[in-house]
Image (cartoon, rainbow, N blue to C red):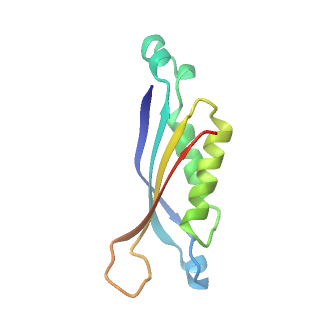
Amino acid sequence: MGNIKLKNIRTFSYHGCLVEEGKIGSDYAVDLEIKTDLRKSSISDNLEDTVDYVLLNRIVVEEMAIRSKLLEHVAHRIITRIFKEIPSVSRIVLAVSKINPPIGGDVEAVTIEMEEYRN
């Protein structure tokens, strides 16, 4: 087994409960870690034998482009889609951060983190 990590995937998205957030948008950062079997690809040196991190990045970017009120909701969509499209993934740890959130204070980021295992 092994892990593949994509760190600090940056997007500009329109998530949030405030109407203004849907119009103005904000910067986001996503960290993704998946668990999968890397033994075959470590021997074969073939992309077909592993999880393509280009596909992982594309899933994150596409789902982040769909507006949600809550970060938890967009994170759930990302997790569900990865499990659906990539059967070899057994575990996902996903963190979604809103950079400079409009919460009336000097806060660098707000982050939610979810961890899910394939059923």
Q: Is residue 22 above or below residue 80?
A: below
Residue 81 position, x and y percent, is 65, 46
The residue furthest bottom is 104
* Residue 75: quarter of image: bottom right
Q: Exactly how many numbered labels are in the figure?
A: 0
The residue furthest front is 119
Residue 64 visible in image: no
Q: Is residue 11 above or below residue 43?
A: below
**83 or 19, nearer to the observer:** 83
Residue 112 position, x and y percent, is 46, 63
Residue 38 position, x and y percent, is 46, 23
Residue 101 position, x and y percent, is 43, 76
* Residue 33: quarter of image: top left
The residue depicted at 35 percent of the width and 85 percent of the height is 105
The residue depicted at 46 percent of the width and 15 percent of the height is 45
**52 or 86, nearer to the observer:** 86
The residue depicted at 65 percent of the width and 62 percent of the height is 66
Looking at the image, residue 6 sits to the left or right of residue 62; the answer is: left
Looking at the image, residue 93 sits to the left or right of residue 48; the answer is: left
* Residue 85: quarter of image: top right
Looking at the image, residue 109 sits to the left or right of residue 69; the answer is: left
The residue furthest right is 84
The residue depicted at 33 percent of the width and 72 percent of the height is 108
Residue 86 visible in image: yes
**58 or 36, nearer to the observer:** 36
Q: Quadrant of the C terminus?
A: top right
Q: Quadrant of the N terminus?
A: top left
